[in-house]
Amino acid sequence: MTQSEAELTPAKIVEELDRYVVGQRDAKRAVAVALRNRWRRQQVEGDLRDEIAPKNIIMIGPTGVGKTEIARRLARLARAPFLKVEASKFTEVGYVGRDVDSIVRDLVEVAVKLVRDEEAAKVRPRAKDAAEERLLDLLLPRGRSFTDRPGERPGEPPALTSGDATREKLRVMLQSGKLDDREVEIELTDDANPLISVLGGQPGVDENALSGLKDMFGALGRKTKRQKLKVPQAWRALTEQEVDKLIDHEAATREAVARAENAGIVFIDEIDKIATNRERHGADVSREGVQRDLLPIVEGSTVTTKYGPVRTDHVLFIAAGAFHMSKPSDLIPEMQGRFPIRVELTPLVAEDFVRILTEPKNALTRQYAALLATDGVVIEWTDDAIKELAKIAADVNRTTHDIGARRLHTVLERLLDDLLYNAPDIGHQTIPITPAYVRERLGALVADEDLTRYIL
């Protein structure tokens, strides 16, 4: 474990989550403790370490209150493999559709990409230098002037020749961008396969099976094709080729599997959709079957992947659902037992919307201001305008379907619709967003409840 991970106390984790998600203190505390317990487990010595299993969490709350965002930000904070799946997309064994084992296979793929990206970042400076030399070879092929010449004493640096001087001048021009308009011809790997492309577009075809086929075809020998590219594009392509050569892929794969097993986080959304209401029949039989298929993975089992067997004993599962039509007790008892920590997320009100529009680093008000600034239009949000926006969003949620913070997207898009359309034509301007501006554009829509059903 790194020092930074040791410093991630539950309080600091909650503080970091507060920068992106408003409120929901109980949910943040629960995931913070779960993440800290992972670090604590790694410090335990002996056989007891393997016996300490993660305490899975189930989040209960309406849509748009921050369930997914909390889990996603937690994984990013921990640099852990993170996978979001929807329970309703899986089917019981024997039915056409995705099987639950694909969750583990997908998680490992995420881990492999995460580790390879980290390794690539470490070797990229060296790879860029090697790619530069290859690019210079294409622009100015090495000649006899680059070999040892007769008469030179052993250990002495070779004298600089006109060829060396030309190459160094070319290097300076390359680094300064003066050769960006030149074209060079390089060899690129051609991964396209017509059979795989056709199969990939068919419904019901398992992507993991296709991935195995791609690997098999790759093992038979990859084709290369020569292509002319401008110097900047060629430099990037050659750099990636050099990165691929420098990475120890076997070690990276072993690290990825270990990280998926010990640090992986799976977020199972819409788990309420597979809860079985005892008073209903028919399709519920299949829903209960999906639960029973999920159970071994959540309990801890070994799943075969193309990278080898992967254990799920220490993967953290976070389930979430609105539970409008069902309740957590409608899940089968074994599934309930595997999610011992339950947290309820509260619906959002106007005060929460004000904080969501102003506090987070990625607040929507900042996003739209940045977008319009690219066209030279500066918008200035007044505090009263934000309060008016928040009130309108809360009123629409109350009178129609409550979709939480997602309502802010529709309200803001409608509010700024004219500006977003006309910004390129109106030139550099500063436009204050006032309560009157908000009411003028949204007042009539909110007043007519029938209209809000279609427009907001």
Image (cartoon, rainbow, N blue to C red):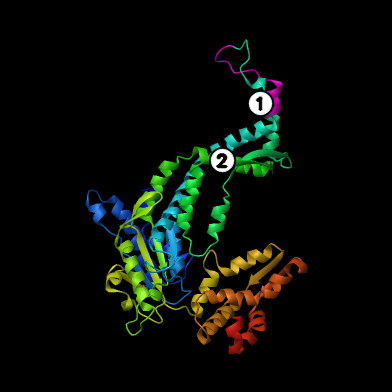
Q: Which mark is residue 301?
A: none
Label count reads 2
Q: Is residue 113 magenta?
A: no
Classed neighbour count for the residue bearing mark 2: other residues with Cα under 10 Å, few (<14), some (14–19), many (≥20): some
Q: Is residue 160 magenta?
A: yes
Please identify the dominant SS of the magenta region: loop
Classify mark 1: helix, strand or loop. loop
Point out residue 318 in the picture as x, y percentages from the top left corner.
37, 66
Q: Is residue 353 above or below residue 106?
A: below
Marked residue nearer the N-terminal end (2 or 1): 1
Residue 295 occupies quadrant: bottom left
Range shown magenta: 153-167
Nearer to me, 376 or 160: 160
Q: Identify residue for label 1.
A: 142
Task: Give the CA distance from mark 2 to mark 1.
Answer: 21 Å
Residue 332 occupies quadrant: bottom left
Q: Amino acid at mark 2?
A: Gln
Classed neighbour count for the residue bearing mark 1: other residues with Cα under 10 Å, few (<14), some (14–19), many (≥20): some
Q: Identify residue for label 2.
A: 241
- The reply to whether residue 60 is visible in this rendering is no
- For the point 64% across and 87% down, the residue is 444
